[in-house]
Image: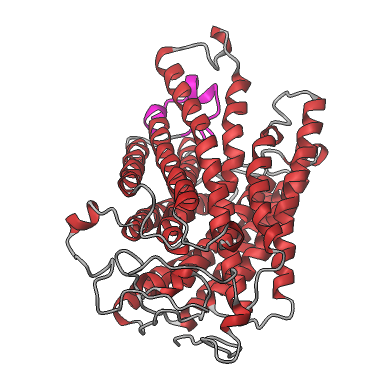
Amino acid sequence: METISHTSQAKPNYLNADYGLKSWLLTTDHKRIGILYLISISVFFVLGGFFAMLIRLELLTPAGDLVLADTYNKLFTMHGVVMIFLFLLPAIPSVFGNFLVPMMVGAKDLAFPKLNLASWYIFMIGAGFIMYSVITGGLDTGWTFYTPYSTTYSNSNVVAAALGVFITGFSSIFTGLNIIVTVHRMRAPGLTWRRLPLFIWAHYATSVIMVLGTPVLAVTIVLVALERLFHFGIFDARYGGDPLLFQHLFWFYSHPAVYIMILPAMGVISECIACFSRKRVFGYDFVAMSSIAIAVLGFLVWAHHMYVAGISTYAALIFSLLTFFVAIPSAVKVFNWTATLYKGSITFETPMLYVFAFIGLFTIGGLTGVFLAAVGIDLHVTDTYFVVAHFHYVMVGGTVTAFLAALHFWWPKMTGKMYPENFSKASALLVFIGFNLTFFPQFLLGYLGMPRRYHAYPAEFQVLNVLSTAGASILAVGFLMPMIYLAWSLQYGKDAGDNPWHAAGLEWKTSSPPPTFNFDETPTVTWEAYNYDEIDAPGGPTHNKGVEVAG
């Protein structure tokens, strides 16, 4: 296998080239911009988690004795808005997509570096408007902004929040455009489409959704603000509008948005499974094409959110069938990952623990999504805690565990430092246990009929709610631990070396941290993706079963 020349550790890299704050705020280096996104979304994650903590404390007892109903409405709304628009949507594409895509394709930067910096500023401006709505009394519409409540009846700061969501949408569009052009036009010589890492395939498919779907949400949210301000007859039936039109427009974007959150997560899982089982991903072509299939089919299933909204029975049956179809490419990935593990030389480093958590939790989330696709079951559990549990098994059990897998997998590359492995494994275990204890009881609550978005509930539901709140406490500890030991590792962590996992991929052929422009010379790729048979062959970079890990 060809060896790639890279800048040595002694030469400037993106971390030590210039320590000035101004240099970071005006940087066009894709790696620094990825770090700026990481810092930003981490702050919003903590804020969203604080709102979640208050929600769970309220639900510890049946009576609404911690906050008033109106305050509770604002808590679950702000939790949803912050977590979805300011954490989940940008978490992997904007952080790891920014940081890794150019290196993975052998480029020195993204296609439009200045547009990339602008996307972060736009994200922060939009986040500022959302935070303004939070600190000036909060938002109480639910994160879905359903009309007519959002346009007519809500007394909260809907316009500021809507404007914030509208602005952050442009950040997603610019990031998606940058990734699409970079993958098409800036791949290294020899890096054909069938040699691309599956991480790139996943981000390419995600970027297509960003570019095509986000404008629909942006226009819809603007229409809500205009109707609220000027009483246009768009959604308000009193002026000739159609209240259901909002739901059609909102979910046309928001169901594909689920895949903006989950497709990059699937790309992360493919990279980690290949590395820690020392095998090429089984059925590489099918896994790659399943990403494209998810992106396409995701636009065809929006109305399964509207079975109880008054759509016709025939339309409901069609959307039910289409929703069953969209589950197939996701199942292709899960089965192919499982086949990759078969007879692999598996090691259990922290990223791999999060991979196993992802597979288990996302599978439960996906299967319960099939339940919700069935019209008869959906009619029973719509707007109950069953939906809350399903959504969190996909979003937290899927996206957040994959985000943590990515953070632990590429942290040595990003910083040049290893983290304490024992603490990181303990954290992964706490996240898995705490998550299941938090959200699995909510499936039971929903099936038994407990509606979501109520701050008080019948006493017979208390035991399951106490379990859920106890699990949330464990989950919070699991999330806080990485913030502590990763920050600790920056100062005290063991030097990681350029490739501590002996992983395949161009990003591992640069120094850690990477040099400012990634490569001294544009690499030429002459090998297939995930060529672990060559890497581990006698005489290769490593031929041991395990990988060297800092303790």
Which scheme is used to colour this image of the protein? secondary structure
- Residue at 46%, 17% in the rendered image: 227
**How many numbered discs sit on the rendered protein?**
0
Residue at (35, 66) in percent of width and height: 518
Up-down: is 457 above or below 7? above
Q: Does residue 519 appear left or right of residue 305 in this picture?
A: left
Is residue 435 left or right of 321 when viewed as pictured?
A: left
Rendering coords of residue 479 (x, y %): 47, 65
Q: Is residue 346 visible?
A: yes
At which x and y percent is residue 463?
66, 58
Q: Position of residue 441 (x, y in %)?
A: 68, 57
Whether residue 59 is visible, yes or no, is: no
Query: Is 149 one of the magenta-colored residues?
Result: yes
Q: Quadrant of residue 43?
A: bottom left
Q: Which of the two residues, 190 or 144, is positioned nearer the viewer here?
A: 190
Residue closest to the eye, 111 or 368: 111
Nearest the viewer among 109 and 373 is 109
Which quadrant does the C terminus fall into?
bottom left
x and y percentages locating residue 434 in the rendered image: 58, 66
The magenta stretch spans which residues?
A: 140-161
Q: Going by the image, does 291 lie left or right of 8?
A: right
Relative vertical location of residue 420 with respect to residue 48 in this rendering, above or below: below
Query: Which residue ends up furthest to the top in the rendered image?
Result: 239
The magenta stretch spans residue 525: no
